[in-house]
Amino acid sequence: MSTIWDLSPSVRSEVGCLERVLVHEPGAEFNTVVDPDAWNWDGLPRQKKVVEEHEALVDELESRGVTVHYLGDVPEQFAESLFVRDVAFAVEEGMCIGKMVEETRRGEERHVTERCVELGAPIYHSVHGPGSFEVGNVVWVAEGTIAIGRSQTTNAEGIRQVRTLLETYDIDVVEVPIFGSTNSTGQTHLALVFSMVTPELALVYPEAVPDEFLELLADRGIDVIPVPMREQRNRATSTIVVEPGSVLLPAGNQTVRSALRDRGIDVTELSIRETKKAGGGLKGLVLPLERASLE
């Protein structure tokens, strides 16, 4: 396990060349879930298949030159630790740590914090007090703008705390209320309904976001590929841009795949058939620590 950080964490977009990430391969803790309903899971995923899907993702990233760091062992109660992006995000050579809402995930923050510190990354802020903030609600729109989804997983106080941090670095916040139209008990993350794939192109499940947000994207010259409901539920918006013009897409989303390829985007499909039963998507498996600037 690497313990030396030779470059500071720096992320300013969803679409610059991905250089360094943090992941967590599901271990024994993944098998501790016996009641999927209590975890809002869609059945019990087979750990062996989830591990295989995760390894295929890591292999793809490493084949593209991405440096992959691992979270390491976690206590057995943290069965959703594989979704590392939900817990923290990098900004301006440091990290912001969220505060998980779901009781089953409280405590993951400590392990991500300790690993980031071990790697040499300073912690700029940890959401605290009455604030709640799950980082699956953070999506960069541009290098100076972050969209933050507001739902049961992120409240106004959490957003206020993070906004204060981001204002220090002249980063604007666009608050996006997420509607309960995603078959998700109101706990959907913004990254499951909105994804940037180039500076001028986004995937959006329009039924889950207000018209004002779609208008904001249009005013910024960002074209939108509407994601149909079936493919949203198949995590089509949970994409990962590895380098400009090249996207990792959950397999089985024919409409979105065709639309991306029609726009000249290179699409690599990866299966998350078992992983998505645990409620997350492809993007949630990867916490970006460094992306190259677009400038």
Image (cartoon, grey):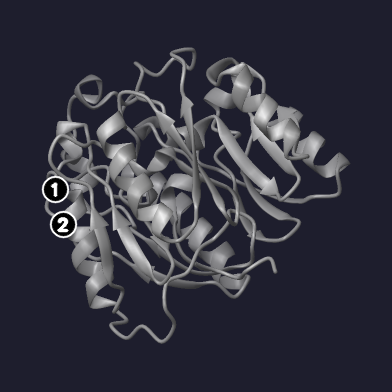
For the residue pair 11 and 19, the one nearer the viewer reads as 11
For the residue pair 63 and 159, the one nearer the viewer reads as 159
Residue 42 sits in quarter: top left
Q: Name above or below for residue 23 compared with residue 248.
A: below
Locate the C terminus and report the quarter of the image it occupies: bottom right
For the residue pair 211 and 104, the one nearer the viewer reads as 211
Residue 66 visible? yes
Locate the N terminus and report the quarter of the image it occupies: bottom left
Type of amino acid under label 2: Arg
Q: Residues within 10 Å of mark 2 (few under 14, many from 20)?
A: some
Q: Residue at x 64, y 62 (%)?
A: 16
Give residue 127's position: percent from left, percent from top. 22, 47
Q: Residue at x 21, y 42 (%)?
A: 31
Label 1 sits on residue? 107
Give residue 68's position: percent from left, percent from top. 44, 70
Residue 133 visible? no
Q: Is residue 162 left or right of residue 32?
A: right
Kindly identify which numbered label has been placed on residue 173: none
Determine whether label 1 and label 2 are within 8 Å by CB: yes
Q: Residue at x 28, y 82 (%)?
A: 3
Q: Name above or below for residue 170 compared with residue 69.
A: above
Type of amino acid under label 1: Gly
Q: Residue at x 43, y 13 (%)?
A: 180
Give residue 226's position: percent from left, percent from top. 71, 25
Label 2 sits on residue? 110
Q: Is residue 1 left or right of residue 179?
A: left
Residue 116 sits in quarter: bottom left
Q: Which structural element holds mark 2?
A: helix
Give residue 101's position: percent from left, percent from top. 22, 33
Q: Name above or below for residue 165 compared with residue 150.
A: below
Q: Residues within 10 Å of mark 1 (few under 14, many from 20)?
A: some
